[in-house]
Image (tube, grey):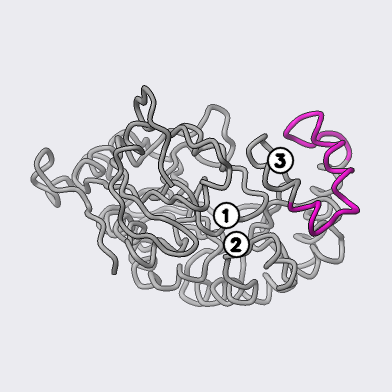
């Protein structure tokens, strides 16, 4: 799959110039030059101030994925390109350490907001692990990782190192505990039981861990009984908090999700089209109903509402560059299959 070449600038030009790394049956990998790994979150984002996504595109291929539109910035208009053309970002550890000076004390950094940091590409290229190694050598940061993959357990030792001197929370996304349903809506994600196993091992290792049910799909995974079953399984696995958000459908996501409904849930397709014809977000009574269901589940099983905050070692925003003395000349992280 080749980016369109016509008067390209910025990220689109970088994507077109990205050298191939590997091609397999389900996806093509390319190496993408990166201006910056650390990006400020949009204004009024409630849960974090900064984002890091080591990859562009996500091979997991969730049918509802909101982030498909991000490939449009690279002039890739086919929404399926998001899961078929994966860009691994080339980055410079010294420059990244310098970037971290922009983070103020108390700011939260979210890893994996648009693409899963532990998607299949991570097994080959290890970008997420390389990032964690930087944070393991620093202290005082507030970090959150969101993933659908039990591959996060590969880095358990490193996560423990990061958590000793930083505030670290791992959010494991589980939209349903029914394996058949999960396979339909998240075709290349690990099974729900594997994700619950990851929650258990993370919690046992002392990593603050919670479960996200995102998104909640009307009349598919939104029943009181289903949410309660997920909450019970999450609690038994050691999750400390539980949260869920309702589906929203940007135009690019709808171009994949609505045909999926036609094939798998045809009795719901018309209702979804009618509701989302009014906009990407659901408003009114339904989101309030879902919020109440999750609140009841939290109360019943003893979840906290959100991750804790705790004091760590003194804030360290300006030092540690001595770890990477060649700030201007240090090589970037190169891609090579592990």
- The residue under label 1 is 307
Q: Residue at x 40, y 61 (%)?
A: 121
Q: Assess whether residue 135 is covered by the magenta stretch.
A: no
Q: Which of the two labelled residues, at mark 1 and mark 2, occupies the earlier sequence position?
A: 2
**Which corner quadrant holds the C terminus?**
bottom left
x, y percent for residue 157: 35, 72
- The quadrant where residue 288 appears: top right
The mark lying in front, picked from 2 and 3, is 3
- Residue 291 appears left or right of 81: right
How many residues crowd mark 2 within 10 Å: few (<14), some (14–19), many (20+)? many
Residue nearer the viewer, 140 or 145: 145
- Circle 2 — which element? strand
Residue nearer the viewer, 204 or 250: 250
- Between the C-alphas of marks 2 and 3, the distance is 22 Å
Q: Residue at x 51, y 77 (%)?
A: 201
- The residue under label 2 is 210
Q: Residue at x 57, y 65 (%)?
A: 188
- The residue under label 3 is 248
- Circle 1 — which element? loop
x, y percent for residue 284: 86, 34
Q: Which residues are magenta?
A: 260-285
- Between the C-alphas of marks 1 and 2, the distance is 8 Å
Look at the numbered discs 3 and 1 and tell me whether their residues touch, using CB distance below 8 Å: no
Q: Which of the two labelled residues, at mark 2 and mark 3, occupies the earlier sequence position?
A: 2
């Amino acid at each position: 799959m080749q980016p369109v070449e016509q008067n390209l600038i910025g990220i689109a030009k970088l994507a077109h110039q990205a050298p191939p790394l590997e091609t397999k049956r389900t996806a093509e990998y390319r190496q993408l030059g990166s201006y910056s790994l650390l990006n400020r979150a949009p204004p009024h984002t409630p849960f974090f101030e900064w984002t890091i996504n080591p990859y562009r595109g996500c091979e997991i291929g969730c049918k509802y994925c909101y982030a498909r539109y991000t490939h449009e910035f690279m002039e890739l208009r086919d929404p399926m390109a998001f899961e078929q053309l994966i860009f691994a970002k080339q980055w410079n550890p010294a420059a990244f350490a310098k970037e971290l000076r922009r983070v103020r004390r108390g700011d939260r950094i979210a890893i994996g907001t648009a693409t899963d940091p532990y998607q299949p590409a991570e097994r080959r290229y290890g970008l997420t692990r390389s990032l964690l190694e930087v944070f393991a050598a620093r202290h005082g940061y507030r970090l959150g990782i969101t993933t659908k993959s039990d591959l996060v357990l590969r880095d358990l030792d490193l996560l423990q190192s990061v958590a000793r001197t930083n505030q670290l929370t791992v959010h494991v996304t589980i939209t349903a505990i029914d394996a058949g349903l999960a396979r339909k809506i998240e075709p290349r994600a690990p099974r729900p039981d594997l994700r619950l196993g990851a929650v258990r091992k993370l919690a046992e290792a002392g990593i603050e861990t919670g479960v996200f049910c995102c998104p909640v799909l009307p009349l598919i995974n939104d029943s009181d009984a289903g949410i309660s079953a997920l909450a019970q399984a999450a609690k038994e696995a050691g999750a400390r908090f539980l949260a869920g958000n309702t589906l929203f459908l940007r135009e690019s996501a709808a171009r994949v999700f609505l045909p999926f409904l036609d094939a798998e849930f045809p009795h719901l397709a018309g209702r979804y089209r009618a509701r989302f014809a009014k906009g990407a977000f659901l408003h009114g009574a339904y989101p309030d109903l879902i919020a109440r269901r999750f609140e009841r589940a939290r109360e019943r099983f003893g979840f906290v509402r959100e991750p804790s905050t705790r004091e760590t070692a003194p804030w360290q925003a300006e030092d540690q560059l001595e770890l990477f003395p060649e700030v201007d000349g240090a090589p970037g992280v190169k891609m090579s299959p592990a």
